[in-house]
Image (cartoon, helix red, strand yellow):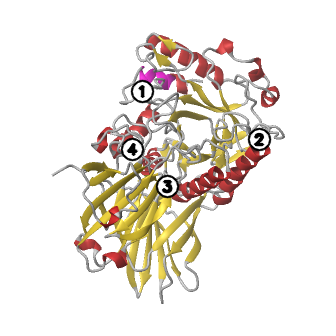
Amino acid sequence: MTTILRPEHPRPDRERKNWMTLNGSWRFAFDRENAGKKEKWYAGRDYHLEIQVPFAYQSKLSGIDSQEHCDAVWYERDFVLPEKLRPLRRLLHFGAVDYKADVWLDGQYLGGHEGGYTPFTFDITDLTEGKEACRLTVRCEDRLDFDQPRGKQSYRPEPFGCWYTPVTGIWQSVWLEGVGEFYPVDFRLTGHIETGSVKAEIELNELPNGGAVRLTASFQGKTVARQEIEVTSDRFIQTELYLNHNEDLEGIHMWWPGHPALYDLTIETIAGGQVCDQVNTYFGLRKIDVQNGYVMLNQTALFQRLVLDQGYWPDGLLTAPSDEALKRDVELTLQMGYNGARKHQKFEDPRYLYWADHLGLIVWSELPSAYWLRDSEKRNMIRDLSEAIRRDYNHPCILTWVPINESWGVPFIRFQKEAQELADTLYHLVHCLDGTRLVSGNDGWEQAATDLVTVHDYTAWPEQLGREYGDIDLMLKTTPTGGRFVSAEGYDHTGKPLLLTEYGGIAMQKDAGGGNWGYNGAVKDEESFLKRFEAITQAFKHMPGFRGYCYTQLTDVFQEVNGLLDMDRNPKASLEEIRRINLSR
């Protein structure tokens, strides 16, 4: 029997006991002539290839490992409904499919989804009623269009520069879930440190007669709050749950990097006096805001030591080979003295966010870039950012959203009104949908609306840094980073927190050359690396007004060989020395 990779529950932040993975072996076909819909492949055909889901066909772990670009591909598999799911409503979940998906069950169209980084769900209860076996078919379309939010996936048929192997099709888990007739479709949890409470906003699938929702919060196994709300006239309920503590659990426990206090929460729906559905989740109490030029976490000034993390693996591409690999990335980041990761150009797997929540790592979450400023790009960015906020709102580890990076997709944002209005729209969209976090509007330079002023600078040595860094007011109005202004025309960011969110990028000589690269040449050995790393890190750490930094980068990514670790996560230098440098004053 073939071992199924990624068998763990894909959403540990909203887990039910009755579920079934659909990862594993699927039938697969390239649709080079784009004839599948016309020929009704969803009605059944011979598939000559086999693929391991959830790995894209371009990856080694998929079992196909082809670098051929193909606009359309098809998947098919049979599954047998387990006994435990048959008395329940049955939901079919996709974690992420890049870029556009159409789904059929036994030849009947379920629906579609557009956007390569966010989840979607179908209720398949009626179509599976009375059936033991079913056939699931998925068509995926992934073009090289510039208006797709694609992030670091190459928009050419081959990798180049700092763009890497594309990912086409199913690249996150697929699973079935059993729910009650009356169940939570979605929920938002917002902790309030001032009142020691959590606001719960719950969307229900229907309004039953005599229905109720029961919430039970606990800390370290001890119940700290319980509330039951009658459902009468609306499928959306909102309540404030105040967390009580006894002599064993004094005070309110807040989420901190390195010390991540988390509360467990059980959400139960009740119909006819019986528990109909149960979801197990968790939340953290923490507050992020800006005061007097400082980023504040729980009313304490926060200095952020971040590392850029692109979330690529040599054998799985954007898909981690295992849950343990995701956990290990969080552990290695913390081990090197970083308190956060800027997840670059990728909405990361929810399992990574789960480990960041539980191990105490700050996360910056970034919208993958599209690359042509037109109306379709704008709509795609708004859609994907909105869906990501909905998916990840409850993760306490996320402190910052990044809608745009380095003016990608908005090349004339410094002076072009259209580009500035897009950036401002995304900034206000985040605050409209998520008022609990900060926004780095256009990370790196040419900022329009933003909460944070961020700078990217790959200068190798402190003595080469521009004089602008000695005068914050001058820096905000000029070009300390090689020709790019910090602010877009018409925007004044005086008094906002200042962070260096890309620097370093040091490569080793043994890795560089032959198309492999880092920034500012390469160093000859570990000693040379640590000397340069320490000098430039300390210089930026002690710049007037800087409230944090982000080193490029955690791992090598294919031709970009400037990681602290190679792509297999082997250290290039002493982790203890890197930690010492990061934690030194």
Amino acid type of the residue tagged 3 in the rendering: Thr
> Looking at the picture, does residue 141 appear above or below residue 584?
below
**Residue, disc 1:** 565
Give the Cα separation between the discs numbered 1 and 2.
Answer: 37 Å
> Looking at the picture, does residue 430 appear above or below residue 246?
above
Dot 2: within a 10 Å radius of its alpha carbon, few (fewer than 14), some, or many (20 or more) residues?
few
Residue 222 in the image, given as x and y percentages of width and height: 42, 63
* Eye-nearest disc, 3 or 2: 3
Query: What quarter of the picture does the C terminus occupy?
Result: top right
**Residue, disc 4:** 319
Residue stretch rendered in magenta on the structure? 573-580
Dot 1: within a 10 Å radius of its alpha carbon, few (fewer than 14), some, or many (20 or more) residues?
some
Residue 408 in the image, given as x and y percentages of width and height: 63, 38
Give the Cα separation between the discs numbered 4 and 2.
Answer: 40 Å
Rendered image quadrant of residue 433: bottom right
Dot 4: within a 10 Å radius of its alpha carbon, few (fewer than 14), some, or many (20 or more) residues?
many
**Residue, disc 2:** 292
From this viewpoint, is residue 284 visible?
no
